[in-house]
Each structure stands twice: as structure tokens, then as C-alpha cells.
Image (cartoon, rainbow, N blue to C red):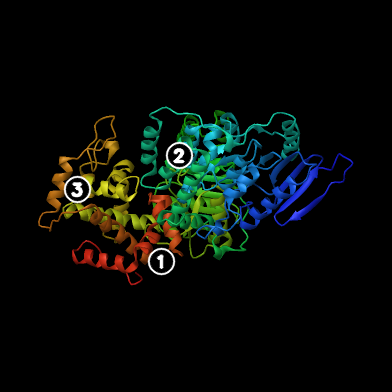
Amino acid sequence: MPTNVFAKPTWDYDIMTVTIERTGDVAVVTIDNPPVNALSQGLRQDLWSAAETLDADPSVRAVVLICEGRTFIAGADVNELGKPPMPPHLPDLVARIETATKPWIAAIHGSALGGGCEVALGCRFRIAVPSASVGLPEVRLGIVPGAGGTVRLPRLIGPALAADMVTTGTPVAAPKARSQGLIDAIIEGDLEQGAIDFARAAVDQSLPLSLSERSVPSVDATFWETTSRAVADRAKREDAPLRALACVRKAVEADFDTAMAFERQTFLELRGSPQASALRHVFFAERSAPRPPELAGVETRSIRSAAVIGGGTMGAGIVAALRDAGLPVTLVERDEAAVERGLSNLRSIFESSVKRGRITSETATERLSGVIGTTNYELLARVDVVIEAVFEDLDVKREVFGKLSTVCRPDAVLATNTSYLDPEQIAAGIKHPERFLGLHFFSPAHVMKLLEIVPTAHTTPATLATGFALARMLKKIPVRAGICDGFIGNRILKITRAQAERLLLSGATPQAVDAAMRSFGLPMGPFEAQDLGGLDIAAFQRRAARARGDTPFAPVAERLCALERFGQKSGGGWYDYAKGDRTPRPSDIVADIIAREAKGMPQRQWDEAGIIDCIVLPMVNEAAKILHEKIALRPEDIDLVEIHGYGFPRWRGGLIYYAQRRGWANVGRKLHDLAVLGLAETAHQDL
């Protein structure tokens, strides 16, 4: 800490999680509440005491609020979520800081999120390092800011920007926040010294009004209606985003105290809602997934370099994900032409990211330069992790691993990316099978967050732990999956698709099924999704399943594939598509095929709730089997697979959570009714 430059001795003392040190006429209040300086009740009390102490000290002219560790205040204490709030309440603390007799300056590094952002808004000034970010992500937990975030923010940056921040929950990087007026200055050097210098300069000038004293800029007369429609479309039945928008509107149309009361009431109403409970469940599941308890204390192998075999759509996506994590990558293909295609696929990914504004062109160039394309397996002799991503064919994959087990170091991790094939069979005969495992990426691999990690009987805990460490590097949600056809996610997906076809054969239409599942909260219905991905992919998987002795159920899909109706790419699948138009249109051809396949079968009138039950509850039944067989170790793992791999609505908490909230007895009865109609299996014993 800085030393006192005046004759008066520096004093410092601890107030539990808060330390105060005075450097001349500037007091530095330092928070140290690991791991993320969360706003626990103890920290709130300590900050309140610090404000009282510093207000009473006539030698202090300004206060710098800064944090130890890797981040500024990252939000509320998650351990207090769902519990009655205890004083001092955060709105009161923010108001106490805002009304302090000495101006407070928030010095931000890492992330100032949620309550951390609200504390910063209570300060008279906000400065940050360039890598910092600020945001109000409460809507992602099914609530709204509860300490004045929706009331102060529009007074600082205007209603439009404030509405976007609070309804999306998306953090804003410090440079952008500076351009918006949310941050007053960017500090390139030492943050603490920069904050002290800023504070001394600020108190020698006329201070700006606190945010509670400022007026709110006006908006266009149509702003609220237009924004409300956009938020509702994006929210897809989540309550919090629209409620957050209502809070911002109240901040514009009412006085400060009235808006604060409205925000607090909205916060308290949502805090105990079913959606908030479900989203908290997902939050905790996501937080614990990267470090499963069964791997606690297991030492991982070092990951400093990686290689990918195969540069197709999946392989290129995996390379992009590895480069996004900063790993140098060697891309191996069978010949020079394939190498060039693979690099071209990778280049297209980075160019698309540039066009979308996610990275700069300089970053794209740097990431592409970190990839070596080759046909020479010998270059993999020193690589730490090799991921095979070639065609989904057992013989082809085994040939690749035969080469890898010869050229790679004995301790190099070897992984196969496969959706359905048995990793045990892929690894048969390789040297050092203990370093082998499955890594099932979801397409596009550089975008989708889910990663199913599939150990074999020979995979050691160290290798498995390394798979999870890689997932953390790639910022993915990892789930351990046992070996079966389709692992966790695709095994349940087969049930989804089979049930959707059973609905068609019993009187429903594709458009009614898709509409019902969108209403349930999925981004797309099952038939729309198949048309987008391509019916030929599932057809290939069904052929492979039949070769293994299985009997997949897809009578209508098989007829469509025989007619080469593979979806949007062929101009028709479950729906018809006009050239250059992705709008699905009901198809007479499909209706005729359904009618012929359903001939002689009982028909019924399906309502939306019935369609949802006919699809979702058999998925739950299959999930129960997966848990019983220990293909998944925890119910939360299935919830994460469905949310991050298949678009199950977060606000429902995931597949198992949804069933639990609905009630196992209710689920069992409904499954029994469907089974009597021949539309589902009977409920599994664990339901």
C-alpha cells in the first residue's frame, strides 16, 4: 500500500473483510472477501462501518474503493440466494455510500457485476482497467437488480442503453463502458495509484451530482412499445427481462424514491418465483460442473499444446475453440488438399466472428497464425492433447489412433470426438489406453458450451481430470457420460424424435408439434430442428444403429430420406422451402406420407399440453434409466446436457428439475396414460 506523504502518521486497521488505509487526504478502502469479493452480510456491514468512520474523519477528502484478488465485487453472495435478506440491506448500503460526505471512487478490475455494479453506481466516480467489465446480469437468475441498478443506470447512460443492459444481463467491457459514460476513466497503469491520483484531481474541481439527484434523459414516444416487443421476443417466456424493462420505465416516468420502491418490490416478488428458483438451480449446477467432487485432488496432466485430426466442420470448430483458449494447434489431414480445406474452414469461422464484432481482424489473424496444417503425424510427437474429429466410422477412427499411439508421447492425452460410436471399440489395441477418453463436442464446437466427457474402462482419473481441465480452458460446461448409444444427450434425443413421430401417426401435424414445443420454451420444434441440421445425419445414425442390432423408430423420416428430402439444404424435409427462403411451409407430400403410415392407427385431437407431455415425459423416463444405469452420475448433469446441448429452457431448470417440480407421481400417472395409448413406455422404476 502507498505510504503517507504527510507528517501525520498513516493509520490502518481491519474491519473483517475491509481494510482502510489513508494516504494523505485520500482513504483507500480495500475489500478482501475471496474468491470473488461477494457482497455477503458481513461485507455489507464492514462497508457501512467504513463509510461511518471515514465521514467522521476530517482529514479525509476522498475515498477509493478497490478490491483484492482477481476481481472487483462480482455480485451478491450466492450462498444467500433464496434466503431472507439480512441488514444492512444492499440498497441502504449503496445509498449510504452515495450520500457520504466524501466522494467515493470505485476502482474496478475484473468484473463489477450485479450488486458490485450497483455499489459502483453509488460511488461518485467509476474508473477501471482496460480489461474490466461491468454489468447487471440479474435477469439470468430470474430476478431484477434490487439495489437501484435500474434506477441509477438510466440517469447515467440514458434509458435505451440501460434497458439493453438490464434486460439482456450482458456485461459491458470497460472501453465500451467508457464511451457510454458508465466509466469515467480508464487506468492503464497501477489501478490503486491511478485511483488516488484521480481522486485528488476530482476533489479540487466541482463534483458532479450523485445519480439519485440527476434527471433522466427523455426517450421517443414509441420507445417503450418497440423495446417491449423486442425484449418479449428475446425473452421467450422468461419473466424477469420484461419486469426489468418495467423498472427502467418507472425510473424514467417517476421520481427517484418511487422508482426505487418499485424496483425493490419487483425484486422481492421475483426472488421467490419458480423461474428464479429454477435459474438458481442451473447456476449452481454450472458452477460445480467443471470440478466434479469425484475428481477432487486428482492431479491433471499439463496442457500447453493440442492437435486435431480432421479439418471438417467439427474439426475446424474444435481448432477454433482451442485457439480461442490460446493453445497452439496442429491440424492434421490426409492430404494437402484436405489441409487447405480445413484451414479454409477455420478461416471462415474467424472471419465470421470478425463480421459479428466478437473479435478484431488482428485477433483473427493471430489465432489463425497459431495453427499448423500438415499431413505428417510425426509432428505430434510433443503435443499434449490430440483430438480426433474424422468421419464417424469405426474403422477410420481406429486407423487414426493406431498412428497416434505410435507417434505420440506415452503421457499425451488421446481423445475421440464421437456422437454415437463406442469409445472402447475405437481405442481397442492402442498403446497406453489409460490416456484415452471420449470428448463429445456439440456443433458448432467453437460456439456450443456443452462437452460430454466419456471415459473408458482403462481411462485413469488423471486423464479424466485432464479432460475436465481442458473443458475449463475452453470455457465449456463439462459433463461426464458413461458409454451407451448416444451417451446422455443423443440417447434422450432419440426419444424426442421417436415421440414426435408417434404424435404424427396419432393425429398431430408437424407444425402443431413444433408450435407446442416452442411454447414450452425450446428455440425450435423437433421437426424444424431436423430440417435445419439435415435429416440425412440422423438417417446415417439409424443405419449404424440397425447394423448394431437396434431397431430405431422413424417410419416417416425414413420415407422422407428415401425421397431425398433432407431439410432446408435440399429444399424440403418435414416442411417445404422456397428457394432462398428458410420459412417452413406445410407440405402436402409430408401430409400424404403421414396419412399412409398412420393408416389404421387410432387418431385423436391433440392440444398443446398433450403434445408437450407426449414428448417431454418420455424424455424424463429415459433420463431416469440413464441415472439408474449410472450413464449420468447426477440429475444436474442431465439438466445441463439438455440446456446446453439441446435448448431446453433454462428457466425450467432442466429436464430432471422440471419433472421434480411437477411431481414424480404426476409424471408417473401421465406416462401410464400414454403407455395405455401405446404412445410411451411405462414409467421406469426410479420414477
The answer to whether any part of residue 212 appears in the image is: yes
Of 650 and 628, nearer the camera is: 650
Classify residue 344 as left or right of residue 678.
right
Give the percent coordinates (x, y) of residue 470. Answer: 56, 51
Classify residue 422 as left or right of residue 555.
right
Q: What whole-number distance in Å separates the C-alpha atoms at marks 3 and 1?
A: 32 Å
Classify residue 113 as left or right of residue 225.
right
Quadrant assignment, res 685 = bottom left
Lower sequence index among marks 3 and 1: 3
Q: What whole-number distance in Å separates the C-alpha atoms at marks 3 and 2?
A: 44 Å
Q: Residue at x 58, y 35 (%)?
A: 213
Q: Which amino acid, mark 2?
A: Lys
Give the percent coordinates (x, y) of residue 35. Answer: 64, 54
Pointers 3 and 2 in contact (CB under 8 A)?
Answer: no
Q: How many discs appear?
A: 3
Pointers 3 and 1 in contact (CB under 8 A)?
Answer: no
Q: Residue at x 34, y 49 (%)?
A: 521
Which quadrant of the rendered structure holds the C terminus? bottom left
Instruction: Say what secondary structure mark 2 lies in.
Output: helix
Give the percent coordinates (x, y) of residue 269. Answer: 44, 53
**Marking on residue 627:** 1
Q: Give the number of the mark in front: 1 or 2.
A: 2
Quadrant assignment, res 209 = top right
Q: What whole-number distance in Å separates the C-alpha atoms at marks 1 and 2?
A: 47 Å
Pointers 1 and 2 in contact (CB under 8 A)?
Answer: no
Q: Which residue is mark 3?
A: 509
Q: Which amino acid, mark 3?
A: Thr
Q: Outermost residue, right direction?
A: 7
Q: Which residue is mark 2?
A: 250
Look at the picture and state if 549 lies above or below 106. below
